[in-house]
Amino acid sequence: MSKNPSVRLAAACWESLFRTQVAVMRRLNQAPAFRQVGVSHKLSVKEYDVLFTLSRCPSGWLRLHEINDRVLLSQSSLSRLVERLENRGLIERQAAPEDGRGILIRLTDEGRSVQKEIGRAHVRDIAALVGPVLSEDEMTELMRLTEKLRAGLPPS
């Protein structure tokens, strides 16, 4: 590794951010929101992430590649996950009218209901993990810093 302290500090900062994200996600995977929902609505964090992403779309519809840009899944994994969610009646797909090759995806009414139900519990789980450790000022500062980092990244 370079002897440049800023390079070492950047690497240490990244490792800290990454290790923290892994630790938090592991705990959230085991949190009540993803363990105590009725059997027909039990979702993984990755499945919930897709429903959440769709719930934030103003038009209601997103292309598969737009979802892929916002979640941490490979294109093939996302395609299989979308198929499972469609089979469960939580999302629907249609061909994009302007090109016929693209696929548009949106939440069904059932999907929206499930996303809201799990989302409320998920927010409580997040607050239970973060709230006792960080003050409101620290949470605000952490959010500011992570948004600054994300905004400064080159487009993918």
Image: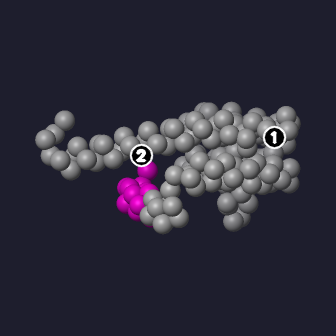
Residue 29, located in which quarter of the rendered image? top right
Pinpoint residue 104: horizontal percent, then vertical percent: 71, 51
**Three-letter code for the amino acid on which mark 2 is drawn:** Leu
Q: Which residue is mark 2?
A: 17
Magenta segment includes 10: no
Dot 2: within a 10 Å radius of its alpha carbon, few (fewer than 14), some, or many (20 or more) residues? few
What residue is shown with label 1? 37
Residue shown at the point (17%, 47%) measured from the top left: 5
Query: Residue at position x 52%, y 52% from top?
Result: 133
User: Which residue is at the front of the view, 77 or 72?
Assistant: 72
Q: Residues within 10 Å of mark 1 (few under 14, many from 20)?
A: some
Whole-angstrom CA distance, mark 1 to mark 2, is 30 Å
x, y percentage for residue 18? Answer: 43, 41
The amino acid marked with disc number 1 is Val
Looking at the rendered structure, the number of numbered marks drawn on it comes to: 2
In reply to whether residue 149 is colored magenta, the answer given is yes
Question: Is residue 156 or residue 23 the one in the foreground?
Answer: 23
The furthest residue to the front: 132
Q: Residue at x 67, y 60 (%)?
A: 56
